[in-house]
Image (tube, grey):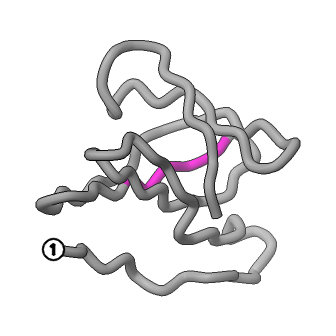
Amino acid sequence: MRIRVEYSRAGAEGLSRFVLGERTIEVDGLLDRWYGERVDYFRVRGMDGHFYVLKHVRCDDLWELTSFTRSESSGTSIGTAAPRVLH
């Protein structure tokens, strides 16, 4: 699912929020990242307490939501497959 990402400072580590449809998710923390030859993945925690994996296609500067996991307090997970690094 395509998303729009906003930065608080230069570089993907400065992710501050992303827009998913009509919903804006504030990023509470960058938890992990994976770098590939053409794409990078970022696991973030939203201010809503949920976890998201965002994919950045560098050559096109496109962002996608590849995984969403509800916070542990809800006990439900959606799309929790680990991201694959594409070459």
Extent of the magenta region: 42-46
Question: Residue 38 vs residue 41: left or right?
Answer: left
Dot 1 corresponds to which residue?
A: 87
Q: Magenta region's main secondary structure?
A: strand
Does residue 43 show up magenta in the picture? Answer: yes
Q: Amino acid at mark 1?
A: His
Question: Residue 69 vs residue 57: left or right?
Answer: right
Q: Position of residue 6 (x, y in %)?
A: 56, 26
- For image coordinates 42% across by 58% down, the residue present is 55
- For image coordinates 68% across by 82% down, the residue present is 77
- For image coordinates 48% across by 38% down, the residue present is 29
Element carrying mark 1: loop
Residue in front for this viewpoint, 40 or 42: 40
- Whether 60 is drawn above or below 38: the answer is above
Q: Position of residue 83 (x, y in %)?
A: 37, 76
Please tell me how many numbered marks the rendered image carries: 1
Does residue 5 show up magenta in the picture? Answer: no
- Whether 2 is drawn above or below 60: the answer is below
- Whether 80 is drawn above or below 48: the answer is below
Q: Residue furthest right?
A: 22
Q: Position of residue 69 (x, y in %)?
A: 64, 71
Task: Work out which quarter of the rendered image holds the N terminus and state it.
Answer: bottom right
Label 1 Cα neighbours within 10 Å, binned few <14 / some 14-19 / many ≥20: few
Q: Position of residue 85 (x, y in %)?
A: 24, 74
Residue in front for this viewpoint, 63 or 18: 63
Q: Residue furthest front?
A: 60
Question: Residue 48 vs residue 59: left or right?
Answer: right
Residue in front for this viewpoint, 47 or 19: 19
